[in-house]
Image: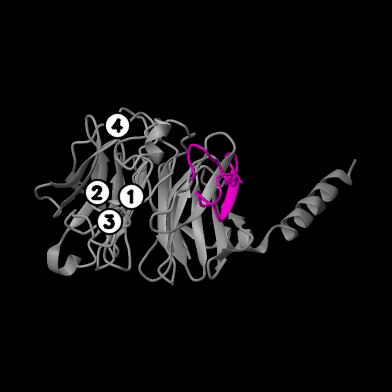
Amino acid sequence: MHLAAPLVLAALLLAACGADPAERSAQRATRTIATNLDVPWGIAFLPGGDALVAQRDRGTIVRISRRSGRKRVVMRLDVTSGGNEGGLLGLAVSPDYRRDRFVYAYYTGPNENRIVRFRLGGRVRPLFTGIPSGQYHNGGRLAFGPDGKLYAGTGDAADTDRAQRLDSEGGKILRMNPDGSVPSDNPFRGSLVWSLGHRNVQGLAFDRAGRLWATEFGQNRLDELNLIRPGGNYGWPAVEGRGDTRGGRFTNPKRTWTTEEASPSGLAFRGSSLYMAALRGESLWRIPLRGARTLRPRRLLRGRYGRLRTVVRAPGGALWVATSNRDGRGSPRRGDDRIVRLR
């Protein structure tokens, strides 16, 4: 009987020693940046290092001071959410912010999703409206590319036919000039559509070579990481995961996960790896890159913080990771939702 406790302790020590070194390192390298947020979604950084955080259901943008960590509301938008997947979603800061002071947002209005821009505390100017909205699959991620263009991931708003229709902005990745106009080198004349055949894109990231990567929610089987090419068709709803059966018409994903492992949202690039925030999988996936090839993914922070919505590279190189435990599908913990910093 007296041997039981030592044997259990030895087993625990052996299990700890056998854990993934990358996971152990990630656990040690995190610290909390902010707590008591309401479904933080988009995160973007101002030139001085302060962060802007979109609270999905409240429609407010919180500014977090780089020096003190103090939070304060600096902008309110008239969003429609109702606790579903819509609301105040993606944020982006103008590459020329020091000159023009513009912030960009993607949010759900009464009957549509909109992309707008504004100066903090100022008038909101619509750039593009009429993006399909619904209870589910609103997309919402914004990112500026190295070409200075604004990219937006949209969802099919639960109408799968939209993903293959060029006359609909649902189920697409859009590319626009900073004023909302159509770039002359977009693949479809007069259209903001950059790629099509998507179900619900909530993660966009550019790697060191300027390649665009995107995460995509699957339906019942497989979630995707896609390398985006202009004019590419990524198969939804005909294909979920790999399975191009139409003579090269569709582009297969670079990686897939089961929906239990992932349900991917935010995406960031740092060093030579992509980092993907997983909601249902409650993990941060690290995907090393070798050029345009993906190497074996590693699962970090598994179960430690619950549902993970957003990951961004902060000034200085650290990753900021936001939880999504108050989104109606998680189990909120004390202090949720939160943002943690991963060195």
Q: Which residue is mark 2?
A: 105
Residue 294 in picture, x, y percent from top left: 58, 62
Q: Which residue is mark 1?
A: 42
**Quarter of the image holding residue 177?**
bottom left
**Are the residues flagged by discs 1 and 3 in contact, CB closer than 8 Å?**
yes
Q: Nearer the viewer, residue 331 or 311?
A: 311
Does the stretch in magenta take in 93? no
Residue 53 in picture, x, y percent from top left: 30, 50
**Are the residues flagged by discs 2 and 3 in contact, CB closer than 8 Å?**
yes
**182 left or right of 214 in image:** left
Secondary structure at badge 4 equals loop
Residue depicted at 44% across the width and 67% down the height = 207
Q: CA distance from mark 2 to mark 3?
A: 7 Å
Q: Which residue is mark 4?
A: 81
Residue depicted at 47% across the width and 32% down the height = 329
Mark with earlier residue (4, 2)? 4
Mark with earlier residue (1, 2)? 1
Mark with earlier residue (3, 4)? 4
**263 left or right of 24 in image:** left
Q: CA distance from mark 4 to mark 2?
A: 15 Å
Q: Residue furthest left?
A: 123
What amino acid is at disc 3?
A: Ala
What amino acid is at disc 1?
A: Gly
Q: CA distance from mark 1 to mark 3?
A: 8 Å
Q: Which residues are magenta?
A: 235-261
Residue depicted at 13% across the width and 46% down the height = 124
Q: Residue furthest front?
A: 247
Image height check: is 29 above or below 42? below
**136 left or right of 45 in image:** right
Mark identifier at residue 92:
3
**Are the residues flagged by discs 1 and 4 in contact, CB closer than 8 Å?**
no
What amino acid is at disc 4?
A: Ser
